[in-house]
Image (cartoon, grey):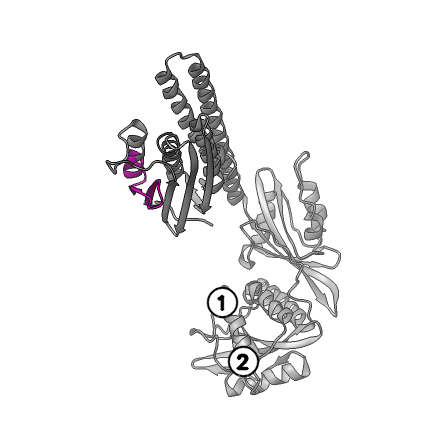
């Protein structure tokens, strides 16, 4: 449970929808703090008439007021009256005089948080007045935008539940570039960084007084995919994000519509040059596609090799030679299964349970040669990194084949079972059969298959393997290993 939800449950009562509203507010109020050059503190009224701090945001554009963490603390006595008035009157309350925090003064404002017509909390806007200088034009526009947004919080128009920003990285921030639009989408103000962004995109001259969507439309190149949400974002009509690409430059733009009495009066747009970020993302996508294609081609080549071995085995008249080629074919097919799984995933990890089931059936069918064999799979391996997937698949395939050929063939058939246990990086697996067992020697055979298994487990997987007779008859082979890569679920 988050700290905010925990504090709400401990000190007050809000409906789930109201708690979610506060989560949306806290998740998207950093840019308001930056615009206001002020700390934002979210206060929740408690059952005993006090206020508890649910969340706190510091501006990245100015000096903070609170150097210590205040989340979970109660409101000071000299602040409580202002918070109570904002809560009861459901109106923004501005302190008449600044309050002194040691050597600097702080201007305070209490803003009621409105959710579906009900005031559920109060946001304190605290501005450090330590600089004492005359604000510049850009700072004035920042603060005016913050005033509009704080007013929207008091009227229930912010945050916006429909503010779908998508999973794209590189979200623009206040300092990256800011534009203010009127209700018709005309530019009222553009910060120097915003002008630089649009100049790199191809805009010449000033932006103020122009329709931003018309300016942007003239820059879009023909036969280039365009985000359908782009016109709505550039006119400030929807709280979304979009990317504009032209002449090798990619501009990421986020719009925040501004409302007054629930009517749209304009918008704040933040923009950022995301050209380098998008280029790297495209390189990663190309790299992922290339890796998947390589795995696909390797799988096809291995299947071709397996088919050639099968054809050659059919022409052999010596039983030993035919058996050797069939074993080689089975091993190559097992490796091909791993590459087939890797070709279908973006990550270098294999969904091992599905793949080992296919390998288990393949090995049992090839080795059974006329006897009845039943295969069972229990437990889960989870995702196995590619580095360990190939040797582990080969080990299990060899053990299943040995169980059928040396254990079940002597009893005319039976059952082979693979069990798996996974705990973090630790993997334990058992291959069990109800065949003839290890015999009087109590040790596995010394054939090629057993040698391959020992080598793969000890050298490639750096694990341990142990053979033993089962009390109810048959053989048990236990494998224990630690994966080199961190598990992913």
Residue 465 located within the stretch drawn in magenta = yes
Q: Which x, y percent locates residue 210?
A: 71, 51
The answer to which of 440 and 213 lies nearer the viewer is: 440
Check disc 2 and report the residue beneath it.
11
How far is the residue under mark 1 from the one under mark 2? 32 Å
Instruction: Name the N-terminal-most of marks 1 and 2.
Output: 2
Asked if the residue under mark 2 is in contact with the one under mark 1, i.e. CB atoms within 8 Å, the reply is no
Residue at 60 percent of width and 67 percent of height: 25
Q: Which x, y percent locates residue 307?
A: 47, 20
- State whether residue 361 is above or below residue 191: above
Q: Which x, y percent locates residue 432?
A: 38, 41
Q: Which x, y percent locates residue 271?
A: 59, 52
Find residue 333 and report its image quarter: top left
Residue 264 located within the stretch drawn in magenta = no
The magenta span reads: 454-482
Q: How dense is the environment of label 2, judged by Cα within 10 Å: few (below 14), some, or many (20 and up)?
A: some
- Considering the numbered disc 2 on the image, is that residue within a helix, a strand or a loop? helix
Mark yes or no: residue 351 visible: no
State left or right for residue 386 relative to residue 198.
left
Q: How dense is the environment of label 1, judged by Cα within 10 Å: few (below 14), some, or many (20 and up)?
A: some
- State whether residue 234 is above or below residue 129: above
Mark yes or no: residue 3 visible: yes
Q: Which mark is residue 146?
A: none
Find residue 34 and report its image quarter: bottom right
Check disc 1 and report the residue beneath it.
62
- Considering the numbered disc 1 on the image, is that residue within a helix, a strand or a loop? loop
Residue at 42 percent of width and 28 percent of height: 367
The answer to which of 61 and 16 lies nearer the viewer is: 16
């Amino acid at each position: 449970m988050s700290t905010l939800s925990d504090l709400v449950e401990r000190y007050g009562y809000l409906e789930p929808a109201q708690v979610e509203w506060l989560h949306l507010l806290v998740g998207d109020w950093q840019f308001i703090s930056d615009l206001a050059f002020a700390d934002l503190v979210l206060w929740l009224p408690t059952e005993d008439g006090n206020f508890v701090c649910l969340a706190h945001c510091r501006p990245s554009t100015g000096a903070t007021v609170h150097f210590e963490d205040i989340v979970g603390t109660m409101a000071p006595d000299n602040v409580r009256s202002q918070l109570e008035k904002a809560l009861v009157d459901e109106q923004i309350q501005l302190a008449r005089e600044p309050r002194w925090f040691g050597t600097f003064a702080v201007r305070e404002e209490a803003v009621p948080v409105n959710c579906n017509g009900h005031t559920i909390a109060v946001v304190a806007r605290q501005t450090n007045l330590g600089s004492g200088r005359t604000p510049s034009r850009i700072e004035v526009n920042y603060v005016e935008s913050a005033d509009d947004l704080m007013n929207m919080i008091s009227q229930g128009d912010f945050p916006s539940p429909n503010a779908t920003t998508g999973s794209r990285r590189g979200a623009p921030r206040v300092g990256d570039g800011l534009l203010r639009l009127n209700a018709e989408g005309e530019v009222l103000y553009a910060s120097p960084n915003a002008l630089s962004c649009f100049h790199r995109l191809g805009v010449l001259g000033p932006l103020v007084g122009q329709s931003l969507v018309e300016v942007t439309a003239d820059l879009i190149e023909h036969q280039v995919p365009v985000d359908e949400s782009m016109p709505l974002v550039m006119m400030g009509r929807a709280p979304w994000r979009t990317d504009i690409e032209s002449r090798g430059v990619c501009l990421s733009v986020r719009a925040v519509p501004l409302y007054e009495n629930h009517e749209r009066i304009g918008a704040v747009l933040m923009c950022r040059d995301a050209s380098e970020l998008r280029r790297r993302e495209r390189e990663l996508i190309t790299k992922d596609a290339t890796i998947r294609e390589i795995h696909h081609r390797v799988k096809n080549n291995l299947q071709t090799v397996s088919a050639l071995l099968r054809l050659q085995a059919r022409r052999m008249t010596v039983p030993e030679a035919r058996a050797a080629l069939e074993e080689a074919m089975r091993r190559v097919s097992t490796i091909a299964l791993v590459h087939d799984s890797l070709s279908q995933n973006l990550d270098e990890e294999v969904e091992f349970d599905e793949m080992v089931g296919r390998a288990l059936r393949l090995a049992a069918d090839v080795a059974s040669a006329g006897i009845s064999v039943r295969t069972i799979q229990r437990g889960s391996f989870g995702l196995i990194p590619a580095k360990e997937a190939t040797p582990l698949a080969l080990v299990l395939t060899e053990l299943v084949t040995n169980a059928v050929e040396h254990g079940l063939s002597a009893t005319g058939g039976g059952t082979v079972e693979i069990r798996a246990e996974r705990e973090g990086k630790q993997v334990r697996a058992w291959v069990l059969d109800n065949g003839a067992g290890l015999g009087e020697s109590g040790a596995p055979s010394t054939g090629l298959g057993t040698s391959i298994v020992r080598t793969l487990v000890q050298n490639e997987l750096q694990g341990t393997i142990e053979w033993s007779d089962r009390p109810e008859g048959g053989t048990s082979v236990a494998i224990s290993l630690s994966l080199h890569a961190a598990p992913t679920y």
